[in-house]
Image: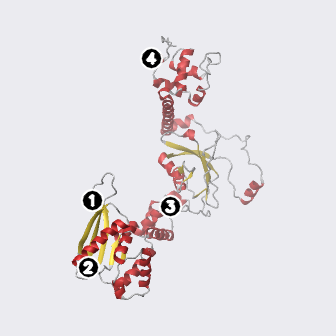
Amino acid sequence: MAESNVDDTGKDIWSLISLDKLATAISSLSERIDQLKDDSWRLSEKTKSSSSCWSEVINALKLDDNEKNRHTLYKVWRGDRHKIHALVDEKKSEIKINKIKEQEGYESNSTGNNSVSEKVIAPLHSEPSLPLPEPHNTRTYQKAITSGNFYERHCIKTEFISLTRIEWKDTYSRTHKKTKPGWTRIFNEKLRSIGNTCSLRFHSACIPSGVRKHNCSDFWFSTACTGDKCQRKYIVSHRRDMDNNLMLLFRVDTYGEENHSEDNIMRPRKISGEERLALGKRANEIGPSATFRELVEAADEDMLVAGNFTQCPTIEAIKKFGVDYRKKMRFDEDVFRECRILSCFYRKDDITSENILDSTGGVLKPMKEQNDIYIYTIMFKDGIDALDNVPLAHAILTDHTVPGIGYFLGNVIHSVNQVTTKKKLRPPSFIIIDFSAALMNAALQQFNIETVNKHLKRCWNVIHRKYSAENIRSLSFIHLCCCHVMHAI
């Protein structure tokens, strides 16, 4: 061990070691790091033995194993000084990643030199005197043997699949502690990447709640082939201690023999969610037949040979996807039904003059301690020419209530009455506004002197032809702007 010439202050420990070396020495304990808080820093026969965690850390740092050094390191770890806990976690992650890279490099070297690996690793023959353990002779097992619907209880092979952090977030919600829609599609693609050609039926994932045991998987599920003759089954489990910062590892245990003979009837997986909408959209763009041709050309030949047609739904199914997509994306027919009924009567009995009333913001800069500033505009339109629009009045308002807007409209009506030769202003046939309830109430109060309820009753009477043309032309009717309606929907 190296000689130490430190004082009794305890701070001179950093003149002999660095923070990075201390984190590396502590991370070398791996799973025994939690024992540091229970291991005493005082010297005794027990603590000075090779089983002591602090003695192992000090030997790794090449320091004297005395109480002063042990006490100093103990205080650094116990008080989490210099964020030593975070540094140790980073070192542990780096060690795990390096182990994985070394293992992958070893596997690549072994596969690249098959002759050497075959000579070194000889196949091991099974010992006939040591039979495999049989399952319990229960009534359920006997019934399964009689019907032939049972699979081998021992695991045939074990493989691993990996999910990135983004794929895991799309699969599992840690907030609600349950799987998200579409999680079966992600795992089905992962199982297909390791050679699965079965059409799988997924069972609900098991997510233990509360305090988990050390040997329990925190997420696992089972899936089996939908074929009548195939007995293939997979059990996928996840353990947190197998993960790193880049991906999550899942263990896949394979059970049962695979049987994809001609008499095996395999049911394809149900297509739903985003995949169903994407196929429906594509069917509406190029047609069901062209979509089916694209799916057949892009399908996996091994899955088609095995009888798994999940990647190639029938043309009837693709047509149904297209119908569902059109139903979801089109507008509701009832939205414009009343508008069409009213417009039919208005075009027949009313004249063509219209008033367009709307407001807009963002023209003027907002003022401090002031409400939002909107510019209100009244446009007059006569005839069917789209360019026949005349601006009638403008107002800049900060009060966007019915009294504020009504005062503006009242001033416009009073000004028009001053210049006209008639005693009373003839109201416009239509007043086009957006969805603003304040604009609707203010316009009805100033032009028709009525409320919204009375206006709706009058519209109902117009539909039932209870008014003459003169009565209809004496009052104004509210229209909603088509552009605002389309934007809102």
User: Of discs 3 and 4, which sits in the foreground?
Assistant: 4
Mark 3 — residue?
273
User: Of discs 4 and 2, which sits in the foreground?
Assistant: 2
Q: CA distance from mark 4 to mark 2?
A: 92 Å
Q: CA distance from mark 2 to mark 1?
A: 28 Å
* Earlier residue among tags 2 and 1: 1
User: Of discs 3 and 1, which sits in the foreground?
Assistant: 1
Q: Residues within 10 Å of mark 1 (few under 14, many from 20)?
A: few
Residue at disc 1, secondary structure? loop
* Earlier residue among tags 3 and 4: 4
When asked about the image quadrant of residue 380, the answer is bottom left
Where 101 sits versus 303, above or below? above
* Earlier residue among tags 3 and 1: 3
Which sits in the foreground, 347 or 378? 378
Mark 4 — residue?
15
The picture places residue 280, in percent across and down from the top left corner, at 45, 66
Residue at disc 3, secondary structure? loop
When asked about the image quadrant of residue 49, the answer is top right
The picture places residue 405, in percent across and down from the top left corner, at 33, 67
Where 333 sits versus 7, above or below? below
Mark 2 — residue?
382
**Residue depicted at x 59% and y 30%:** 34
**Residue depicted at x 43% and y 66%:** 281
Residue at disc 4, secondary structure? helix
Q: Residues within 10 Å of mark 2 (few under 14, many from 20)?
A: some
Q: CA distance from mark 2 to mark 3?
A: 50 Å
Q: Amino acid at mark 4?
A: Ser
* Earlier residue among tags 2 and 3: 3
Which sits in the foreground, 293 or 122? 293
Q: Amino acid at mark 1?
A: Val
Which sits in the foreground, 475 or 211? 475
Mark 1 — residue?
363
